[in-house]
Amino acid sequence: MRQTDVVIIGAGPCGLFQVFELGLQGLKAVVIDSLDRAGGQCINLYPGKPVYDIPAIPAISAEDLTGRLLSQIAPFEPEFFFNETVAGIYGDAGAFQVSCTSGLRIQAKAVVIASGAGAFKPVQLKLAGIDVLRERSLFYQVKCPEQHRDKHVVILGGGDSALDWALQLEKIAASITLIHRTDRFRAQPASVKKMMQLCSDLKMQFFQGRVVEYSALQGELKSIKVAGRDGIVRRMELDHLLVFFGLSATSKQFGQWQLEQQFNQIVVDTQRFGTSREGIYAVGDINWYPGKRKLILSGFHEAALAAFAIKEQLLPGKKAYLQYTTTSPLMHQRLGVHPDISDLID
């Protein structure tokens, strides 16, 4: 069984920053996430869209923000486990066992839940047997746009992710067809307008309907059948099918972990961001307290205070004193930086 100081459930921005704050306290962390990479909901739903409310950074994409956070925590060498769903948290403060549905078990002294709205999974296309084509010709996210270069691509969905990727991949794909059940979209009006203009210019197609059948050969999609709103079923040939129906989240397990909840969020105090169960903390969108605002900035603040609380939990009777990264030799040592880095700052 693996052992660590703290298990962090969730690898979104707040979970990643929690690694940093724990590292400054000299604590090691293991990070578990149900998705297949770091970044959480924001990198899976809108990786290229700008985020404007990160201090000192006027605009940054979710993808770049995740990359910078990963670089920031690199000195602390966290261990990541992706595609893992936590089944239970057993034991007491100082001696928890975090168990995943895969059989993975990790022993930790404290646990931080930073899982946003819960464990996320892409909402899947409900066609029998089609999931065996996943990551070959069926995709629920775009990891590498170049993978779709010169391909005939069909995109399903009517939200920002579907529109954003339709507009981006139109530049490199052999063809783009967007299919949505209606002409009412849940995307930015500017994106819808641009998509419609590309359709008018015959650079892509939009079709109202839903996929009802598919055909595949040797593990690759060859065609789909689409039932249109006019009642006609049409056959479309394609190379890749991209599905953006959103992400489904569950917070049902929190009750099973004996954690007090309010509005499907975990109740915490605002001094330690501790939950109703000693030794378990919650930061970011998953927690609730009076005046809570679901902002990345708020989650960063919560992660900092939780790290101090965890340090004091692990060293009873001793206060975790604030040390500034600008001047503290101990902080420099933990970060692996030279005390005088003025030559790196212009």
Image: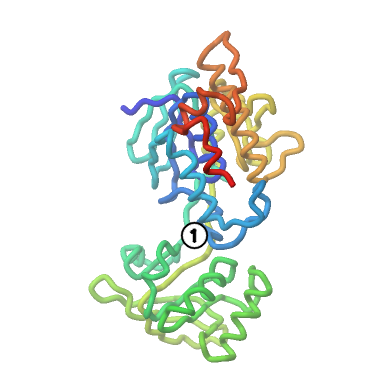
Horizontal side of 342 relative to 105 (left or right) equals: right
Depicted 170 relative to depicted 260: above or below? below
Q: Nearer the viewer, residue 43 or 137?
A: 43
Coordinates of residue 43 in the picture (x, y in percent):
52, 55
| Amino acid tagged 1 | Val
Coordinates of residue 8 in the picture (x, y in percent):
48, 34
Residue at 63% from the left image edge and 79% from the top image edge: 183
Dot 1 lies on which element? loop
Residue at 52% from the left image edge and 45% from the top image edge: 12
Q: Nearer the viewer, residue 250 or 273?
A: 273
Give the quarter of the figure containing the N terminus.
Answer: top left
Coordinates of residue 150 in the picture (x, y in percent):
37, 80
Residue at 63% from the left image edge and 34% from the top image edge: 302
Depicted 138 relative to depicted 119: above or below? below
Coordinates of residue 14 in the picture (x, y in percent):
56, 41
Residue under label 1: 123
- Is residue 86 in view? no
Residue at 58% from the left image edge and 18% from the top image edge: 320
**In the displayed image of the protein, which residue is found farthest to the bottom?**
201
Density class for disc 1 (Cα within 10 Å; few <14, some 14-19, many ≥20) is some
- Is residue 139 in view? yes
Horizontal side of 103 relative to 78 (left or right) equals: left
**In the displayed image of the protein, which residue is found farthest to the right?**
291
Q: Nearer the viewer, residue 64 or 285?
A: 64
Depicted 104 relative to depicted 122: above or below? above
**In the displayed image of the protein, which residue is found farthest to the top?**
317
- Occupied quadrant, residue 186: bottom right
Q: Nearer the viewer, residue 233 or 133?
A: 133
